[in-house]
């Protein structure tokens, strides 16, 4: 009698073991016995896990969170006090934060920083240092906020048109200089830009001019050392120029402004706070200092 031939059937099934696809092969003979073995299938390897956000993306996310928190805090505070705006330019990151940054305010005496910058630009253009007379008036203007010294320099530099030309060179696009210099209108964005031009290496102002401005703004009279310096920590240096004016057109309410820079081992920021409508000068100073310190609390510079 003829024997039936042994037929061998190959069957295969894919299973997953420990995250790796394996091919199960079986050999089945006529006697029904089966033998199996496993082989790895390299084509079915699992995809690698995503790497996640980059350090830059994480930094942007963290920054956005801080900005939202500061926006909310300032908005809440603004509902309880007269109108103000505030801006911070961080030289280390190049980032600018601004709350109501495009709102225009009258400068009062913070315009004296613009007059000083223009004086230094004009001296540079003439290829000379400031004269002894200019130096004397500049020191009175910045350290003591002397109005007569300011008016003298303002007139010498070409009055409103002359200062405006300097502002253009310094990139101040939102500032309009007035014939009565204290009524010049500006924004906090322009003010921190001006402050940065007093420090940046690529500024139109020379290193010598920048050092001169820094010396004056870091040695103001003791009774004028308020505003931006309130946000400085122990061991840090602050420069400042403040402005204050009881405005007759606002029923004697006060304009209170402060612009300056804070530097230290881990910080280099320019800050500007502009405000008006205060019943008293001390009340306005409180608002300006609170706004400046809040930026540090939330932005954590």
Image: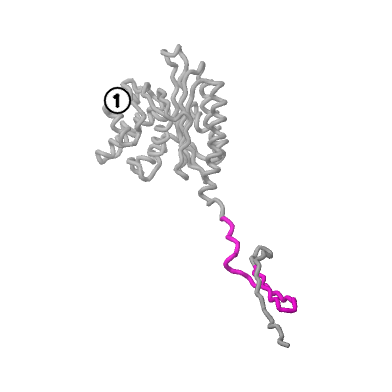
Q: Residue at x 28, y 37 (%)?
A: 123
Label total for image:
1
| Label 1: which secondary element | helix
Which quadrant holds residue 17? bottom right
| Highlighted magenta segment, given as a residue range | 22-50
**Residue furthest left as drawn:** 126
Relative to 7, say whether 210 is above or below: above
Residue 161 image offset from top left, x and y in percent = 27, 27
Q: Residue at x 70, y 74 (%)?
A: 36
Which quadrant holds residue 45? bottom right
Q: Residue at x 36, y 28 (%)?
A: 175
| Residue 285 seen by the camera | yes
Query: Which of 114 and 46 lies nearest the eye of the viewer?
Result: 46
Residue 232 image offset from top left, x and y in percent = 53, 36
Residue 72 image offset from top left, x and y in percent = 56, 30
Query: Which of 94 and 24 lies nearest the eye of the viewer?
Result: 24
Query: Which of 237 and 171 lies nearest the eye of the viewer?
Result: 171
């Amino acid at each position: 009698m003829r024997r039936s031939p042994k037929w061998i059937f190959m069957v295969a099934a894919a299973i997953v073991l420990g995250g790796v696809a394996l091919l199960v092969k079986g050999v089945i003979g006529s006697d029904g016995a089966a033998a199996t073995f496993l082989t790895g299938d390299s084509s079915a390897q699992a995809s690698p896990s995503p790497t996640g956000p980059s350090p830059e993306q994480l930094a942007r996310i963290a920054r956005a969170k801080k900005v939202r928190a500061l926006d909310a805090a300032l908005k809440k505070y603004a509902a309880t006090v007269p109108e103000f705006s505030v801006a911070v330019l961080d030289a280390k990151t190049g980032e600018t934060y601004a709350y109501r940054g495009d709102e225009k305010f009258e400068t009062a005496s913070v315009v004296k920083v613009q007059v000083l910058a223009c004086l230094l630009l004009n001296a540079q253009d003439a290829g000379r240092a400031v004269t002894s007379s200019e130096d004397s008036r500049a020191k009175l203007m910045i350290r003591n906020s002397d109005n007569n010294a300011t008016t003298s320099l303002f007139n010498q530099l070409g009055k409103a048109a002359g200062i405006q030309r300097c502002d253009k060179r310094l990139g101040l696009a939102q500032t309009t200089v007035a014939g009565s210099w204290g009524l010049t209108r500006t924004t906090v964005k322009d003010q921190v830009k001006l402050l940065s031009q007093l420090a940046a290496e690529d500024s139109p102002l020379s290193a010598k001019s920048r050092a001169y401005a820094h010396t004056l703004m870091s040695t103001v009279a003791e009774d004028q050392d308020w505003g931006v310096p309130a946000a400085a920590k122990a061991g840090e240096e602050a420069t400042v120029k403040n402005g204050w004016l009881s405005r007759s057109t606002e029923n004697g309410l006060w304009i209170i402004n402060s612009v300056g820079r804070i530097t230290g081992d881990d910080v280099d920021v320019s800050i500007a706070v502009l405000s008006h409508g205060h019943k008293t000068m001390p009340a306005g100073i409180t608002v300006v200092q609170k706004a400046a310190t809040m930026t540090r609390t939330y932005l954590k510079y």
